């Protein structure tokens, strides 16, 4: 690739910002608020539009359901369009309800698994309403102590649940499967590494791809090699660009996200 | 040491439980509540008393200020005594106020450092009122990005601030200095390792000792060797018994704490 | 599974010891010799036979080519049989020749790749001569600096090379593909994790399975979960039981190896 | 500090190269030789002189005893001087003799400790003969299994041995104490972290200082903070500039070493 080619591609790169990055966030110890933090989805879209106006490379914003849920989705799409941006990936939340204490799609209780699937179905509908073609899935599922649940049973529930979810996807919609080494679970995490995500996506089909959060690996992991391998296997779905010095820190400066389809370019 | 000696010493071991371990806690993602969780310091003491009644080896409970602050300290001491337990270490909170965003005793703003010191002074007074002889100090101080503050300035503020705090200690009261590899800060932590805590305690004097939380080290650290060395240097002040598979998890089953003075036994 | 079932299965477990574990070994700094260390394959078989005589559960010994190469393979098989043991997995050596400086099957030079394949072909023949049904493959391939080679090219060479090797396997012979997080390479390792090994085995076919060395993972990895997942995917081929506190240490006490086929037992 | 000041200081920075970096080296698996590798101390000095001629900032070369031992030390000093370089730090080797299997100054056998001290005494004499003012000490001492030795006894032997060594230092000679997280030992390392090195140096006196090898820390360690703290405590003695992605790799490109006295510059 020539230098000009590289610069041209770089100029064409589109980054998606996450709506939740515009609000206050923090650690388990305290959330230190800052003046001007966005409080509603409307303010988050305002901020995202400003970022795009200033950078020219952030034309879309990812939403998180239910944090960004509104009564009128058409109004929201309109609000974004008027400000020169569009709605990007829809992110289901499968950890914020008390029911998810032992997991969502991997929960031993079938009613909770049903609730999780139902929430994903709603997210797919929202995506369709908003013209989004991507569901970006991160599971907080896991266990905190050895023996708390059966690891093989959990893997069966994981693949069964995602298979049901995959069947709900309309043509042209992608499911991005994100993995994370640990947290919030501290003994086992049901989608802990790219290998699990890749095997699951292979089972599901071509609309499922792996999402690489650069901050979700064990110390020392060669992330660029994982990217090379996922490209070779046509399983690379997108990135979350976070730093990670110790654990996943989700520091605001780094929480940029791209859902532009990764392409094997050789 | 003979087997009998060992068993005898084990039988004499007293563990201190932390009041906050009896309430709900969680991760930055969600706090999953459980029925029966203690809601007030009175309920926390009830639970601590029950644990001691059942185990016979948990006669004291550590308090956290301001979480456990009450109007009448004498009433609280009485409440504990009636239930067969006593008040153990007093833990100042130097992270829960918005002012501590850039640190407490290491904060670049002298007014915040003053506020932190004032809080510690109050904790010492509370300890004296309650018959406690231990201040257990954990700082959440640190920075999230390189260049956010000057590392050498922060170390100067750390030693200056703890020197002022040390001067406030009455005779017979210990200051336990806890270290932690990272979290909540993600770039630098002002008390990141036992070496820093040990050098600081050496500066302060014999009433300052190092507190080893077994979950506060980098992966692979030989914690037993640190304990051996602190014993040899007469700097071992106590333990927090937490597990750590990835990051500090503070899992409830492990958050037992001992403030019984560590003794070099050879 | 009842307690009796578990004990019965445990009693039936066969462990394979590696011939190289009976000789001197060490670190890059020094090899500290010990008296009585086995010096030849014959002495290694003597020692393996003694271990089996004493334990009753180590009936086979893995060989490493060329370290264990002899003129007369029939004589060697006979020597083992007379001593009550048999030959287990055959391990090709793809790092001990100066030609392998930049890798073996991933080497940019096709002549070196050819040499590596030729060595594997010889190992397959040796296995057939000795009645062994397992080739156990560990690659030392990798790079030490970013840019030293193209990661995507290396992955192509890896899959192409192993495909050729797989084609050489006779019916009934398994290929175990071992992964390792790092070492001897320090920037990228061509088979760094179970995910890569699993995807490669899937490409190759049912005679290829993943070998889990318990000491070959990043710090904090939940190895039992990897085992559960490989069982579910019918990709678990065997174990090397090494400890790992820091890096792969291959400490002698732990370098036991089983090539008994792993079975999904539910 | 102004930009000009910074550039001026950078231009004045002198780096010391280690003689062993000019020869072949490798991992425990294999040493891949390269043509032109220096074979003798004379060739190593030739190479070091070439590096200095090309860079202008590497005027000294560290020696390793016994690898660089010669009959005539005056001739060696002369050989270096003629080539425009000088002899830097002298590095005792306390791991290459079979006697050091269980350590050198921490060895349970007093005869081995005596041998180690005797070797250090020789190194001090060599330093004096060659006009070097620095002994750079790295210990490979440690244990591989819990219980192999008593951790507190080893720490006593460590401090006792280094105290004896320190007493041998002539006026004006520094002892640099290097620490390393692990390797070659895999359970405990007797000088595992900067904290141990700092406490030991404090015991010894002002001629002892800590040497920071940038590749000798646990994953994620904030090395710049350690440097800031050692500066503040006037304990910073020098650096070894190695990279470390996984374990200590000692990759040639990075194994530059400075023994120029670290100064607190504010």
Image (spheres, coloured by chain):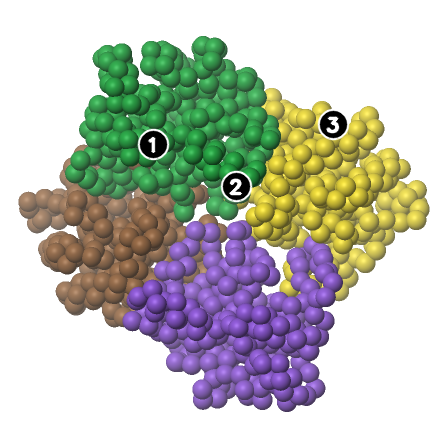
Chain colours: A brown, B green, C purple, D yellow
Of D183 and C22, the residue lying toward us = C22
Q: Mark 3: which secondary structure? A: loop
Q: Badge 1: how crowded within 10 Å, few (<14), some, or many (20+)? A: few
In the drawing, what numbered circle is on residue B3?
2
Q: Mark 1: which secondary structure? A: loop
Of C246 and B52, the residue lying toward us = B52
Q: Mark 2: which secondary structure? A: helix
Residue shown at 31% from the left, 57% from the top: A191
As drawn, D266 above or below A71:
above
Residue D90, given in percent of the width and then of the height, sits at 79, 41
Residue C189, given in percent of the width and then of the height, sits at 52, 63
Residue shown at 59% from the left, 47% from the top: D147
Q: Which residue is mark 3?
A: D207
Q: Which residue is mark 1?
A: B56
Residue D225, given in percent of the width and then of the height, sits at 53, 33
Q: Tell me if label 3 and label 1 are in contact, CB under 8 Å.
A: no
- Let me know if residue A72 appears in the view: yes
Q: Are marks 2 and 1 on the same chain?
A: yes
In the drawing, what numbered circle is on residue D33?
none
Q: Going from the N terminus, do you reach mark 2 or mark 1 first?
A: 2
Residue shown at 8% from the left, 49% from the top: A74
């Amino acid at each position: 690739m020539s230098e000009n080619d590289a610069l041209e591609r770089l100029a064409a790169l589109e980054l998606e910002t996450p709506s939740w990055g515009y609000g206050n966030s923090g650690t388990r110890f305290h959330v230190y608020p800052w003046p001007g933090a966005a409080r509603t989805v409307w303010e988050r879209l305002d901020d995202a539009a400003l970022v795009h106006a200033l950078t020219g490379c952030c034309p879309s914003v990812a939403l998180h359901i239910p944090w960004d849920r509104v009564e009128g989705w058409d109004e929201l799409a309109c609000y974004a369009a008027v400000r020169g941006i569009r709605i990007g990936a829809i992110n289901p939340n499968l950890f914020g309800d008390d029911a998810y204490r032992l997991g969502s799609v991997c929960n031993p209780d079938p009613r909770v698994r049903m609730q999780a699937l139902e929430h994903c179905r709603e997210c797919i509908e929202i995506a369709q309403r908003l013209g989004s073609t991507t569901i970006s899935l991160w599971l907080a599922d896991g266990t905190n102590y050895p023996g708390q649940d059966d690891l093989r049973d959990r893997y069966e529930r994981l693949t069964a649940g995602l298979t049901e979810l995959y069947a709900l996807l309309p043509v042209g919609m992608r499911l991005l499967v994100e993995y994370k080494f640990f947290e919030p679970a501290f003994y086992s995490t049901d989608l802990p590494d790219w290998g699990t995500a890749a095997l699951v996506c292979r089972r599901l089909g071509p609309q499922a791809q792996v999402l690489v959060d650069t901050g979700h690996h064990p110390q020392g992991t060669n992330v660029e090699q994982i990217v090379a391998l996922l490209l070779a296997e046509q399983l690379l779905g997108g990135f979350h660009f976070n730093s990670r010095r110790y654990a996943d820190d989700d520091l605001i400066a780094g929480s940029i996200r791209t859902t532009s389809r990764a392409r094997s370019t050789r």
